[in-house]
Image: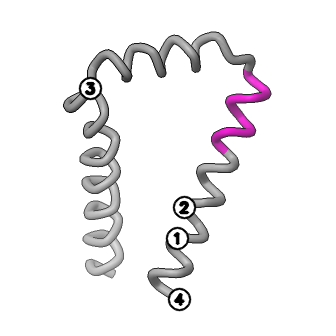
Amino acid sequence: MDIIWNDLWAAIALMLIIEGIVPFINPGAFYRMLKVVSEMDSKNIRILGAVWMGCGLLVLYWVRG
């Protein structure tokens, strides 16, 4: 059971690292991205979220498969 929790925390840590790359390297692009997303309606944001989750599941299946 500890391995599952360690994997979960490792995945969260990697997500935070990856999410922080764009604002660290190019803050201007990050501001523009936030502006674009803030102007999107909820339906499109949900679709985008679903697509990203699907991509994540496919990569996880490929890596852990």
Extreme residue in the right direction: 43
Q: Looking at the image, is mark 4 or mark 3 earlier in the sequence? A: 3
Identified at 32% across, 16% down, the residue is 28
- Kind of residue at badge 3: Asn
Element under disc 2 = helix
- How far apart marks 1 and 2 lie (CA) works out to 5 Å
Extreme residue in the left direction: 24
Q: Looking at the image, is mark 3 or mark 2 earlier in the sequence? A: 3
Image location (x, y in percent) of residue 3: 28, 80
Image location (x, y in percent) of residue 53: 61, 54
Q: Is residue 47 magenta?
A: yes
Q: Looking at the image, is mark 2 or mark 4 earlier in the sequence? A: 2
Q: Residues within 10 Å of mark 4 (few under 14, many from 20)?
A: few
Q: Looking at the image, is mark 1 or mark 4 earlier in the sequence? A: 1
Q: Which mark lies nearer to you, 1 or 3?
A: 3
**Looking at the rendered structure, which numbered label has been put on residue 26?**
3
- How far apart marks 1 and 3 lie (CA) works out to 26 Å
Extreme residue in the bottom direction: 65
Q: Is residue 65 magenta?
A: no
Q: Are marks 2 and 4 in contact (CB under 8 Å)?
A: no
Identified at 37% across, 22% down, the residue is 30
The quarter of the picture where residue 21 lies is top left
Element under disc 3 = loop
Whether 10 is drawn above or below 52: the answer is below
Name the side, left or right, on which 51 lies relative to 18: right
**Looking at the rendered structure, which numbered label has been put on residue 65?**
4
Extent of the magenta region: 42-49
Give the main secondary structure, helix, strand or loop, of the magenta stretch. Answer: helix
The quarter of the picture where residue 25 lies is top left
Name the side, left or right, on which 58 lies relative to 20: right
**Looking at the rendered structure, which numbered label has been put on residue 59?**
1
Q: Are marks 1 and 2 in contact (CB under 8 Å)?
A: yes
